[in-house]
Image: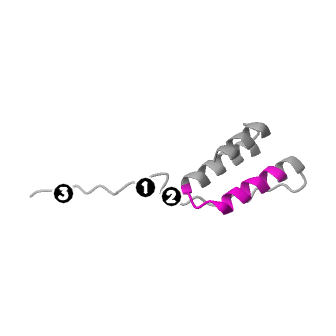
Amino acid sequence: METETVEEPKPQSNEEEATKLMIDRPSDFRFHAAYLAYSETWDKTSSQETKTKLNEITLSLSNKEISYSNFYKTLDQL
């Protein structure tokens, strides 16, 4: 008896649907302004790759892993 091996297709990261982050901090003016810039860019793009990158830089900013200037530089490149 012959067995057939079937591999499930693995979803690629750019095919997964990114979800918008809800991490605004209205009491932190600098972060709030950055979040508004993130949100505006998010709403204007349909690219899942761009949305994933937006989430990455916003989370990095939230976790103080990148500076505000690096956040805005990267945002401008998207």
What residue do we see at 73% from left, 54% from top?
Answer: 38
* Dot 1 amino acid type: Pro
Residue 18 in percent (x, y) is at: 58, 58
Residue assigned mark 1: 11
Q: Is residue 20 visible?
A: no
Q: Are marks 3 and 1 in contact (CB under 8 Å)?
A: no
Q: Residues within 10 Å of mark 3 (few under 14, many from 20)?
A: few
Q: Secondary structure at mark 1?
A: loop
* Dot 2 amino acid type: Glu
Residue assigned mark 2: 16
What residue do we see at 76% from left, 56% from top?
Answer: 23
Q: Secondary structure at mark 3?
A: loop
Q: CA distance from mark 2 to mark 3?
A: 28 Å
Q: Residues within 10 Å of mark 1 (few under 14, many from 20)?
A: few
What residue do we see at 86% from left, 47% from top?
Answer: 30
Q: Residues within 10 Å of mark 2 (few under 14, many from 20)?
A: few
Main SS of the magenta part reads helix
Q: Answer with mark 2 or mark 1, whichever residue precedes in sequence.
A: 1
Q: Are marks 2 and 1 in contact (CB under 8 Å)?
A: yes
In the visual, does 22 lie left or right of 10? right
Q: Answer with mark 3 or mark 1, whichever residue precedes in sequence.
A: 3
Q: Which residues are magenta?
A: 33-48
Residue 16 in percent (x, y) is at: 50, 58
Tell me which corner region of the image, top left, top right, bottom left or bottom right, holds residue 6.
Answer: bottom left
What residue do we see at 11% from left, 56% from top?
Answer: 2
Q: CA distance from mark 2 to mark 1?
A: 7 Å
Whether 43 is among the magenta residues is yes
Residue in the foreground of this view, choosing between 66 and 9: 66
Residue in the foreground of this view, choosing between 40 and 58: 40
Q: CA distance from mark 3 to mark 1?
A: 22 Å
